[in-house]
Image: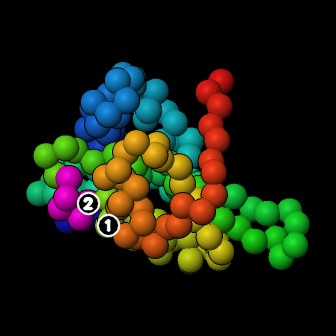
Amino acid sequence: MEIRPVQESDLEAIGRLHADFWGEVSDVASMAETLRRLDDDPDHVLLAARIEGACVGTATGVVCHGLYGGFDSYLVIEDVVVDPRHRREGVASALLGELERIAREQGCKQMILLTETCRSDAVALYESAGFASRWTGFKKKL
């Protein structure tokens, strides 16, 4: 398995992964435009997991910089999606591991993510990766 930054050649597969998971279709040309815009931003981490040349998973990390105390940075993780045919093969764990490596490299003091409590498989994955569910998270769609 290869974990690397998303490339334009991954976008069609990532669009399918997101459509299958969330039921939202993404325009590949718009995805490519966004990827080019974020490509030079070290605070945006877009990863692809590839097996035998095919993109089978993706994850996003965004570094946020604190304005108080020790001015600690932290990484917010979003959009962890793995092709159902490749679940339980370590794809999500590998993506999370690479995000953690990058977060440490960038001086982040913690990583934060949200998942729906009804997704017991995802909850178990995140707990096995060292995440604790001691807090309550909220999300508001705009």
| Residue 127 visible in the shown view | yes
Foreground residue, 133 or 24? 133
Query: Please, is residue 56 above or below residue 16 in the view?
Result: below
Q: CA distance from mark 2 to mark 1?
A: 5 Å
Q: Which residues are magenta?
A: 87-91
Q: Residue 95: x and y, percent?
A: 36, 62
Residue positioned 20% across, 53% down in the render: 87
Overall secondary structure of the magenta section:
loop
Element assignment for label 1: helix
Q: Which residue is mark 1?
A: 94
Query: Please, is residue 124 above or below residue 78 in the view?
Result: below
Q: Residue 128: x and y, percent?
A: 37, 70
Query: In the rendering, which numbered label is found on residue 91?
Result: 2
Query: Please, is residue 138 above or below residue 58 in the view?
Result: above
> Where does the C terminus fall, quadrant-wise?
top right
Position of residue 71 in the picture relative to residue 129 (left or right): right
Asked whether 29 falls inside the magenta stretch, the response is no
Single out the residue that lies furthest toward the right: 68
Element assignment for label 2: helix
